[in-house]
Image (tube, grey):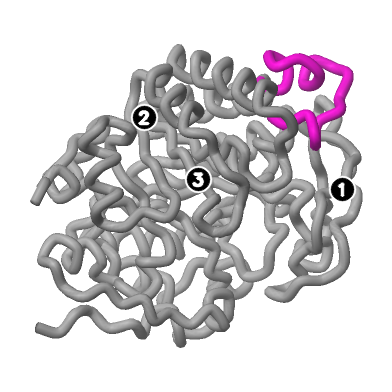
Amino acid sequence: MNQKLFSPYRLGTLELQNRIVMAPMTRNRAIGNLPNELMALYYQQRAGAGLIITEGTAPSPNALGYANIPGIFSDAQVKGWRKITSAVHAAGGKIMVQLMHTGRMGYPQNLPAGAEIIGASAIAAQGKAIKNTQRANGYIVPREMTNADIVNTRQEFVQAARNAIEAGFDGVELHGANEHLIEQFLSPNSNRRTDQYGGCVENRCRFALGIVAAVGEAIGFDKVGIRLSPYGMNSWTSPQETDSTYEYLIRELNNLDILYIHFADHSAMGGNWVPPHTKVMIRKLFQGNIIHTGGFDLASAQSAIEVGLADLIGFGRLFISNPDLAERMKNGWEINYDWDPTTFYSPVINGYADYPSYQI
């Protein structure tokens, strides 16, 4: 058996125990948007992964577009996260926080008082919004962000990143995928601006690159990753436009010398098909580490590392029902596929921290 997947890996200054990454998954357990003891148990149980990337975490009140997702902008939230990072580190794991701004994907009733739905342009997302944890009506039209909003939002990301380091995280991942705010600026479907943040590829990438640069300057570029999802969801139009956008973006990210790109392929979950040449293009262009997530099993994960498509492999749903997934894979133990989707987004322990480890 090829053992690269299970061998230690140096990610920047981090010494990972293996190349298995627990991918970010929204789980809606942060009641009142506060990280809590139940979440600490959940993440500690999964510390056998080489790296844990947390669920999407809001850098500001405006970013809290989903119910019961955590934030990292208040003192109480930082205190809550510190308990979680301490639990993971005590179990020998490494953990980074994913900073996620929902932008136009949010629902007003999920936001705290005084917050609002904002986006790159005044264009509603397709489909149905999530009200609490249930599908509601269509998305609302966001308020188009002014230049002052853009500056303020960038600073919110910077402060959230500083808070993350204070809370004990090993770094931050910027969520530039899944139609969230950063991707809303990247895509011409959601960005119809006529200023320096819209129109040509260079302008549409300006918001993302500005946040990456500002966050990297604040906490160190060796502590910053970004998640991208070319062809994902409803954000993209022609293949040529998609590839040209990401080719430019990745070349510019190389200049910033960030820690990694996390490439998310949603086709295994019913999303759009991602052409193989796009994955190869990202690998050839980006000079840093690449995490690849999307429908992997043990054999395909090992193959992706062996052929050099990725340096680390992310697993999502398998970590829900297998808290000891890395150990199960390494030892050839049975993988538990018996997860309960009805509990994915409920605010209780059931279907969250009650899945057992493998019993020898």
Residue that mark 2 sits on: 259
Foreground mark, 2 or 1? 1
**Extent of the magenta region:** 185-205
Dot 2 or dot 1, earlier in sequence:
1
- Left or right: residue 73 versus residue 301 is right
SS label for mark 1: loop
Main structural element of the magenta stretch: helix, strand or loop?
loop
- Observer able to see residue 66: yes
Residue that mark 1 sits on: 124
Q: What residue lies at 91% left-to-right and 49% top-to-bottom?
A: 141
Residue 40 in picture, x, y percent from top left: 37, 70
What amino acid does circle 3 point to? Asp
Q: What residue lies at 69% left-to-right and 22% top-to-bottom?
A: 241
Q: CA distance from mark 2 to mark 1?
A: 33 Å
Dot 1 or dot 3, earlier in sequence:
1
Residue that mark 3 sits on: 265
Foreground mark, 3 or 2? 3
SS label for mark 3: loop
Answer yes or no: do the residues labelled 3 and 2 have beta carbons within 8 Å? no
Residue 87 in picture, x, y percent from top left: 28, 65
Q: What residue lies at 10% left-to-right and 66% top-to-bottom?
A: 331
The C terminus: image quadrant: bottom left
- Residue 197 magenta-highlighted: yes
The relative height of residue 64 versus residue 204 in the rendered view (above or below) is below
- Left or right: residue 300 versus residue 120 is left
What amino acid does circle 2 point to? Leu
Dot 3 or dot 2, earlier in sequence:
2
Q: CA distance from mark 1 to mark 3?
A: 24 Å
- Left or right: residue 68 versus residue 53 is right
